[in-house]
Amino acid sequence: MSGAVLLERERLTSGTTWHTAGLLWQLRPSDVEVELLAHTRRVVSRELEEETGLHTGWIQNGGLFIASNRQRLDEYKRLMSLGKAYGVESHVLSPAETKTLYPLMNVDDLYGTLYVPHDGTMDPAGTCSTLARAASARGAQVIENCPVTGIRVWTDDFGVRRVAGVETQHGSIQTPCVVNCAGVWASAVGRMAGVKVPLVAMHHAYVVTERIEGIQNMPNVRDHDASVYLRLQGDALSVGGYEANPIFWEEAVKSRTGAAGGLCLKTSTVKGCTVRSDDLRRA
């Protein structure tokens, strides 16, 4: 990793990282994603702490996909078969078995669930800080308060555009390779190199409940049909939903060179974000 440089526009985790859900679901329809997630789980749950002595905040409380129709349950059965091929333990549960595992859940309208006991939750800020510590120990440089202002490109003899360097407020870095990890600002960074990144930022609301007796150590829950997740958060739940008519946040993808503040969320009012009955019917 010697020679790698991470440029952070402000402070690590000061943007969108600190309030991400931090959920890790190991089973996806793609075998490539399953392998990548299995690797991520090993790194986050064990290897980073062994290497750095820092804790990523990993909690192995399991994950539960719920099926409210037959087609979704069939899909989860296919995911379980894929997981077996890659060594990911999972179980398709009946509604009664689901109720035993998660007594607080309303299972009256469920066809079944897919339970992955080794799924879990990580602390996004803790994970990011631990990754930075590990990278620095291997020779990488992490430079904070150093926003990128431009990317220099050139065209080779074959007409291929290539990176020549990166411009910042504090100087230039000569490099043939740039990895765009700017999140909601990825489109703005891509435009610096003449590349269109198909990414649009939008509002996302989540609700944190008060303390719920008996919720401790319960698995995280994902309902793909209702587009909602329930994340264990100590003695409470964080409930997040994906809006059918999202509000695009144009300001979040605009370049803010020289701005003093980070990504600011006005949480006192959330206009246009609704909590639907689908989000709450599991209680």
Image: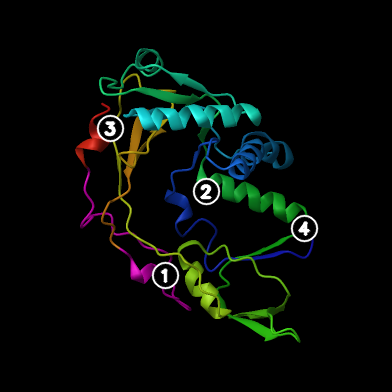
As drawn, the label of residue 125 is 2
**Residue 66 visible in this rendered orientation of the protein:** yes
Around disc 1, counting alpha carbons within 10 Å, would you say few (fewer than 14), some (14 to 19), or many (20 or more)? many
* Circle 1: element type: helix
The reply to whether callout 3 and callout 4 are in contact (CB within 8 Å) is no
Eyeballing the image, is 15 above or below 23?
Answer: below
Eyeballing the image, is 204 above or below 121?
Answer: below
Disc 2 residue type (three-letter)? Ala
* Circle 3: element type: loop
Disc 4 residue type (three-letter)? Met
As drawn, the label of residue 137 is none
Determine if the magenta segment contains residue 263.
yes
- In which quadrant of the rendered image does the C terminus lie? top left
Main SS, magenta region, reads loop
Residue highlighted by disc 3:
210
Q: Quadrant location of residue 102? A: top left
Q: Earlier in the sequence, mark 1 or mark 2?
A: 2
Around disc 2, counting alpha carbons within 10 Å, would you say few (fewer than 14), some (14 to 19), or many (20 or more)? many
Residue highlighted by disc 4:
1
Please name whichever residue, 225 or 145, is drawn nearer the observer in this view of the structure. Answer: 225
Residue for point 70% across, 42% down: 52
Q: Earlier in the sequence, mark 3 or mark 2?
A: 2
- Counting from the top left corner in percent of width and height, residue 252 is at 39, 67
Q: CA distance from mark 1 to mark 2?
A: 22 Å
Eyeballing the image, is 125 above or below 218?
Answer: below
Q: Which mark is in front, 1 or 3? A: 1
Residue for point 39% across, 63% down: 201
Q: CA distance from mark 1 to mark 4?
A: 29 Å
Q: Which mark is in front, 1 or 2? A: 1
Determine if the magenta segment contains residue 252.
yes
Residue highlighted by disc 1:
253
Disc 1 residue type (three-letter)? Val
